[in-house]
Amino acid sequence: MKTTMSMAALSFALIAAASSSAQAAAGTTASVVSQENLSTTAALQLAGRATEIASSRDMKICIAVTDADGHLLAFTRMQGAYAGCVEASIAKAQSAARFAINTITFYDLARKENLAIGTIPGILPAVGGVVVKHDGHVIGSVGISGATDLTEQKLAEDVAASFR
């Protein structure tokens, strides 16, 4: 009787394990999604393009390019750019990517609505952080710092729009 119960328990355990494995395998496919992201090569090209455009506009800036999650892929500090623009450009790019929205939106909300939106971790209410999109999906971002607000914003928009 003890052997019969042990065999029954073992059989039950094996069936349950097999069922669980099958469910896990089926669930893995439904639970895992792929995310489109900017490639490192494309990020370096965008940083290079930003440098070229900035040079043609007599700007000395810092350029940060991130993936869709806001992780830095490329960074350039042009000769003569202020040291303070390093962290600012990275923070702008991270904020834009992580919230999938251009940082000028946060800037406008903070100014017009007098919101303390800048106290929310990760949100930077400043201009110059612009998302890069592919087929309507955010795949990365560009952060520009070191010039005036309007010129930073325009450059970031131009660089993001140049992505193909």
Image: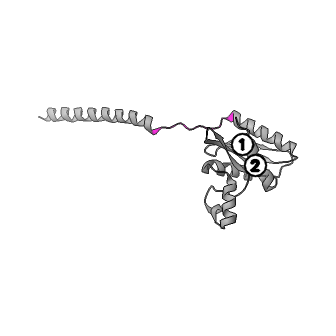
Side of 74 relative to 23 (left or right) = right
| Residue 109: quarter of image | bottom right
Q: Is residue 147 above or below residue 65?
A: below
Residue 145 seen in the figure: no
Residue 160, which numbered label? 1
**x, y percent for residue 31:** 45, 39
Along the line of sight, the residue nearer the viewer: 102 or 20: 102
**x, y percent for residue 115:** 64, 66
Q: Residue at x 81, y 41 (%)?
A: 51
**Amino acid type of the residue tagged 1 in the rendering:** Ala
Residue 7 seen in the figure: yes
* Magenta span main SS: loop
Q: Residue furthest bottom?
A: 114
Side of 114 relative to 148 (left or right) = left
The N terminus lies in which quarter of the figure?
top left
Look at mark 2 in the image and give the residue it sits on. 144
Marks 1/2: CA distance? 11 Å
Rate crowding at label 2 as few (under 14), some (14 to 19) or many (20 or more) other CA atoms within 10 Å. Answer: many
Identify the secondary structure beneath mark 1: helix
What are the residue bounds of the magenta stretch? 31-40
**x, y percent for residue 164:** 70, 34
Rate crowding at label 1 as few (under 14), some (14 to 19) or many (20 or more) other CA atoms within 10 Å. Answer: many
Magenta stretch containing residue 132, yes or no? no
Magenta stretch containing residue 32, yes or no? yes
Side of 48 relative to 136 (left or right) = right
